[in-house]
Image: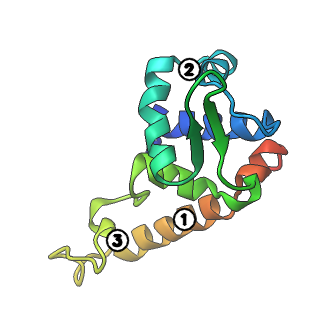
Amino acid sequence: MKISTKGRYALRIMIDLAKNDKGEAIPLKEISERQGITLKYMEQIMPLLTRAGYVRSFRGNNGGYLLSKAPSEYTVGDILRTTEGSLAPIACLEDTPNRCERKDVCTTIRFWEGLWQTINEYVDGVTLEDLVQGKK
């Protein structure tokens, strides 16, 4: 499993919004400058975060973005799944129930299921607040 730049940048953007929250919308340009992410790429990521309800967008002279909830209410897993989709290490685990024709004879399926469970438990056990505070 490899997390794309979109997933990594989404986390950085969310952390930036949490760290710089002063109750006013934060312009994308400011986040871009602090994080070294191009505006063009951020404009691809922000709609995903907005549609997921993680950020609120404001237009106009004082426009920008704010987190919709407290940083403690977001898990890394939620943010990554929004940008990456499934975090399953193999494709057959993405279907529920598993429709792989070999699932009943696969000698490695338990290993992959265990890895997926470990991944999910870890990313769902770390909040945005943990990252802001440097705990993880």
Give the amino acid type for the residue marked by disc 2 in the picture. Answer: Ile
Decide: few, some or many residues near mark 3? Use Cα within 10 Å; few <14, some 14-19, many ≥20: few
Q: Which residue is located at x 69 percent, y 55 percent?
A: 69
User: Where 57 falls versus 27 (above or below)?
Assistant: below
The residue under label 1 is 120
Measured Cα–Cα span from mark 3 to mark 1: 19 Å
Q: Quadrant of residue 47?
A: top left
The residue under label 2 is 37
Q: Which residue is located at x 61 percent, y 28 percent?
A: 63
User: Where 82 falls versus 13 (above or below)?
Assistant: below
**First of labels 1, 2 by sequence position:** 2
Farthest residue in the left direction?
101
Nearer to us of marks 3 and 2 is 2
Nearer to us of marks 1 and 2 is 2
**First of labels 3, 1 by sequence position:** 3
Left or right for 19, reference 118: right
Q: Residue 109: which numbered mark, if any?
A: none
Secondary structure state at the residue bearing disc 1: helix
Q: Which residue is located at x 59 percent, y 45 percent?
A: 56
Count of numbered badges drawn on the protein: 3
Residue 1 visible in image: no
Left or right for 62, reference 52: right
Give the amino acid type for the residue marked by disc 1 in the picture. Answer: Asn
Q: Quadrant of residue 58?
A: top right
Measured Cα–Cα span from mark 1 to mark 2: 27 Å
Decide: few, some or many residues near mark 2? Use Cα within 10 Å; few <14, some 14-19, many ≥20: some
